[in-house]
Image (cartoon, grey):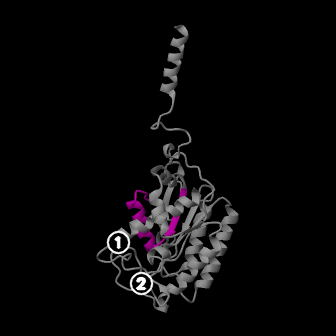
Amino acid sequence: MKRLSFFLIGTLLWIGCSPTEDSPTPNDPDTTNPVTNGAMGKGQPGVVGTAGVADWDKLSTSEKGRIMGWNALFLHQSVGQDLEEGCKANGYPFDYYGKGDKTDGAASGKGLKGGIFVDVGGIPNGNPSEKIRVFRENATRNKDILQIMIFKFGYADIMDDNYEKVQTEYKTMIDALRAQSPSLRFVHVTPPLVYSTSSYEGNAAKMKVGQWMKDTFKGTDVIFDLQALEANDGSCQQSNVWRICPDNRNTSADPSDVNGVDTSDGQGHIGKKAGQRISKALLMSIYNAGR
């Protein structure tokens, strides 16, 4: 009887202490705290395009939340504001980053920071060289804490007469930052498109820079292919030149929260609903940079 009793007691204790289907285990990624456990993996270089929307939706909540445990800075201009609003609508807002700021403003110095070039460095659209300079300065000032840098040109920055110069300056900056901070991750953004495909609006030049980014950096970094998302993988084009699709523009049917409605075909802001969808691919790009 005594041997049987000991057996029954031991069995009950084993059942009570054993993990059940609902019990978290140390190796379950869905039970880790994504904010306090901000460890980064090796990353997954490559291009994130339209499929990035569905890929983001497939991630668990805890995996998505990992990006809030990393120190990331996104510098951009007006289309970037549309993307920031979309990220916010998806539950992953960017903290404001302005002139002279550091990226350690959030708890533990982690989280997404976003700034527009006109605030950070007084740089308007149409001056890509100065944007590159300001981007490099801010990456350098934050080099001890920054983990992910995201750069986006404006749609007025790249034209037929300057795209090769922009490529050279941009590559020089990336090489310098990579040498300075070998562990820094980069998310490159293909330049946004406008609706007009006239040569003087520069969509063809923007496409060349976008392809150059993919050819140059896809083996080491993440490229957020904004052009593919704006043009629905090229379904919106004229004479082989891509344009932002009407269903992605900020029209009266889908105005932008920050940029209203475009009044010219030479513009290419993103609508609120479209921005919420497209920004999922940006979030996926950040995730891939640090996963």
- Check residue 88 for magenta coloring: yes
Q: Amino acid at mark 1?
A: Ser
Task: Say whether residue 9 is left or right of residue 259.
Answer: right
Q: Position of residue 285 (x, y in %)?
A: 53, 64
Q: Secondary structure at mark 1?
A: loop
What's the residue at 43%, 80% (across, down)? Answer: 244
- Check residue 86 for magenta coloring: yes
Task: Say whether residue 256 is left or right of residue 181.
Answer: left
What's the residue at 50%, 62% (across, down)? Answer: 284
Label drawn at residue 256:
1
Q: Is residue 191 shown above or below 73?
A: below
Q: Position of residue 254 (x, y in %)?
A: 32, 73
**Quick check: can you spot residue 141?**
yes
Q: Quadrant of the C terminus?
A: bottom right
Q: Is residue 57 shown above or below 14?
A: below
Image label count: 2
Q: Give the residue pinned by disc 2.
A: 195
Q: Residues within 10 Å of mark 1 (few under 14, many from 20)?
A: many
**Is 9 in front, or is 289?**
9
Q: Residue furthest top?
A: 1
Q: Quadrant of residue 84?
A: bottom left
**Quick check: can you spot residue 100?**
no
What's the residue at 62%, 66% (across, down)? Answer: 221
Q: Amino acid at mark 2?
A: Tyr
Q: Which residues are magenta?
A: 71-94
Q: Residue furthest left?
A: 252
Q: Are marks 1 and 2 in contact (CB under 8 Å)?
A: no
Q: Position of residue 232 (x, y in %)?
A: 44, 76
